[in-house]
Amino acid sequence: MSKLTLDGFFSYCKQIAEHIQLGERMASLSGQSTPKLTSGVGNLYYDSILPYREDAGPQTREFLARVVDVLLDFIQKVNDRDEKILEFKMPEEMQKVLDLHLPDEPLPLKQLLEDCKVTLKHQVKTGHPHFFNQLSCGLDIISLAGEWLTAAANTNMFTYEIAPVFILMENVVLEKMRAMIGWKTGDSILAPGKYSLVALCPIYMLFLAARHHKFPQYKEKGLTSIPGHLVMFTSDQCHYSVKSCASVCGLGTDYCVCVPSDERGRMIPTELERLVRYHKDRGHVPFFVNATSGTTVLGAFDPLMEIADICEKYDMWMHVDV
């Protein structure tokens, strides 16, 4: 056996250290260990890293790397069928676990990292294979990486001058989206979703577009240009925003007619036509039908083709809430 040299011994020790570091890294990804900051970085505050200190690149990198470790650990658990979907606690008990007070002074980075861990520990794992509640789906890792990228770029897409790459990306994506629905032209403005702070903006705009389409003179003449009271129709399983639209836009909730649905939560076309005829016979003006593809409770899809035939027959605007 050859004699071990001093250089060989140090090389052997270095290999062992690298294996230990690798083992700790893999353990952190599998939830067997908890990502931690070194004391030199953990005791720093927000103004000790970028962008406040230009020479704090290594400290900034360490802090963000540990945050990513926490996120990767969470992603691992989300996709583990043996993990619970939620560590449920009643609100009173949860408030004892969480430190939710707002301090007047900043907290050190190690505390921020711990807060990230606690937040995710008590978060519902909506991407879990056994999560069956509405509106959420599994986490797409590529999309997550894209979201990290856009958050790091931290730019607004006002003009090409300020966001050249994102503007070109947006044009390509919107062109593809328009092609999928048969549109050759269109602008680059997407309405805020109905679950945002401006929750009802899309349905408001659609209501106004439908009214203007049927009565373009409304812009100048107002209500006096409409030969009767407008009536809109929607499923009794629709989103609450439709009723709110009728209230805010001046139609009145009594004239937002809920059409009965079948046992699977789908609008019944024969009932829709019956109610349209009922209101026409009373001098009202049916002008708008809201159909739904994926209701919030039952996930029902209204029979769009049959509804479309009725809308065409009675000259009504048809909107599909997806």
Image (cartoon, rainbow, N blue to C red):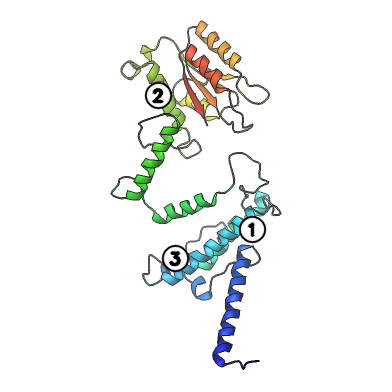
Number of the front mark, 3 or 1:
3
Marks 3/1: CA distance? 24 Å
Category of crowding for the residue at label 3, using alpha-carbon neighbours closer than 10 angstroms: few (below 14), some (14–19), many (at least 20): some
Residue 7 shown left or right of residue 49 in the figure: right
Q: Secondary structure at mark 2?
A: helix
Residue 311, placed above or below residue 8? above
| Marked residue nearer the N-terminal end (2 or 3) | 3
Residue 229 in percent (x, y) is at 45, 13
Marks 2/3: CA distance? 48 Å
The residue to which callout 1 is attached is 97
State the residue at coordinates (50%, 49%): 143
State the residue at coordinates (44%, 24%): 207
Report the disc number at residue 46: 3
Marks 2/1: CA distance? 50 Å
Residue 263 in percent (x, y) is at 68, 23
> What's the amino acid at mark 2?
Ala
Category of crowding for the residue at label 1, using alpha-carbon neighbours closer than 10 angstroms: few (below 14), some (14–19), many (at least 20): few
Residue 31, placed above or below residue 209? below
The quadrant of the picture occupied by the N terminus is bottom right
| Marked residue nearer the N-terminal end (3 or 1) | 3
**Nearer to us in this view, 2 or 88:** 2
**Nearer to us in this view, 7 or 156:** 7
